[in-house]
Image: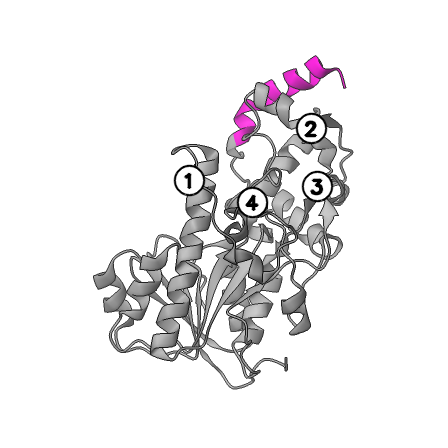
Amino acid sequence: MTSPNTTPLRVLLLGGSGLLSGAAREAFLAAGHAVTVVSRGSRPLPPHKNLSALRADRHDAASLAAALNGRSFDFTADFLAYDAGDVERLFAVPGFAPGRLVLISTGQVYLVGEQQRPPFSEADSDTPAIPEPAPGTRDWHNWVYGMGKRAAEGALARESAAHGVPSLALRLPVVQGEQDGQNSRRLWAWLQRLRDGGPVLLPDGGTQPVRFVYAGDVGAALLRLAGPAPWPALPALNLAQPVECSLREFLEQAAACAGLSPCFVPVSAGELEAAGLDGACAPYWGRWCSRLDPSAALALGLRTRGPAEYLPGVVRAHLEGPPAPPHEGYARRAEEIALAAKLGR
């Protein structure tokens, strides 16, 4: 792929306050493009001469139409499509022309499949889905999310073909970024435990392979996809860091960036489950942490970086930025410490 277009583009970002949309906004503004953000307006956007905001409720067809009726753009990135209805409402807006359209999707589209062969290539999303888990469980919430994204991707293919819009589903794993301390707080969950000096439970000894993506690399990828390079032939692309590492290796790097010495305590899945801590104490672990093969995207020139490159800045931002609220699982920290003592490891 060639370098980004030097002619200012009209860019639409559907979603304004999240980690990814913020990274995309910064990338396009830094390149001199005119950016319009559509959101509910619950959080103010940073002032910028090339940035404008529109208010709309993505789930309300009338609200969305009022904001986008008759508007045209060169490139649209959709961070808010979670099911087929979200995509269909967007294409139903009268006179709306999105230009090139990228739907931000997820590795969960693979994890709801019956066949699990990580790291996943794009074709693996075509496998049949597992049966719906028991409603209200952690598995069920993850299943609903993955199935919703599968449906959104299907609607994108249908609607974009019908309207002659070049489109792409960009599938991502867990995203790391400087602003995540105020969003999902998954890295913060580990840093909190490392900082308090107590034992840190490490499921399966941290042997599970992990593969994340840096938010800044997603913003740069969207900038490249905006043009003028030829549009990718695939309907979907995975984007992730170039290589996998183990969870323990990742956390050791994070601890080193924070100047901390981790006290990891290996614990089995069964021991965590028996203590009722399997869903509380360990982000990035378990069945619902996707591992994507980004070979196709990297071959197109969409560069990504590994933890050694992005973690120092991300950890520093978590430690030096505005105080983050505790991760929800940290409320049970005393139980984790008790379990470590019981195990005597």
Q: Residue at x 47, y 34 (%)?
A: 138
Q: Amino acid at mark 1?
A: Glu
Q: Amino acid at mark 3?
A: Leu
User: Of marks 4 and 3, which one's residue comes earlier in the chain?
Assistant: 4
| Quadrant housing residue 88 | bottom left
Residue in the foreground of this view, choosing between 75 and 311: 75
Residue 76: image location, x then y, percent: 43, 71
Which corner quadrant holds the C terminus? top right
Q: Which residue is mark 3?
A: 247
Q: Which residue is mark 1?
A: 132
Q: From which residue to which does the magenta span run?
A: 329-345
Q: Is residue 276 visible?
A: yes
Q: Residues within 10 Å of mark 1 (few under 14, many from 20)?
A: few
Which corner quadrant holds the N terminus? bottom right
Q: Are marks 2 and 4 in contact (CB under 8 Å)?
A: no
User: Of marks 2 and 4, which one's residue comes earlier in the chain?
Assistant: 4
Q: Closer to the camera: disc 2 or disc 1?
A: 1
**C-alpha gap between disc 4 and disc 1:** 32 Å
Compared with 144, 230 (above or below) is below
Residue in the foreground of this view, choosing between 106 and 127: 127
Q: Amino acid at mark 4?
A: Gly
| Quadrant housing residue 90 | bottom left
Q: Closer to the camera: disc 1 or disc 3?
A: 1
Q: Residues within 10 Å of mark 2 (few under 14, many from 20)?
A: many
User: Of marks 1 and 3, which one's residue comes earlier in the chain?
Assistant: 1
Q: Closer to the camera: disc 2 or disc 4?
A: 2
Q: Which residue is mark 4?
A: 181
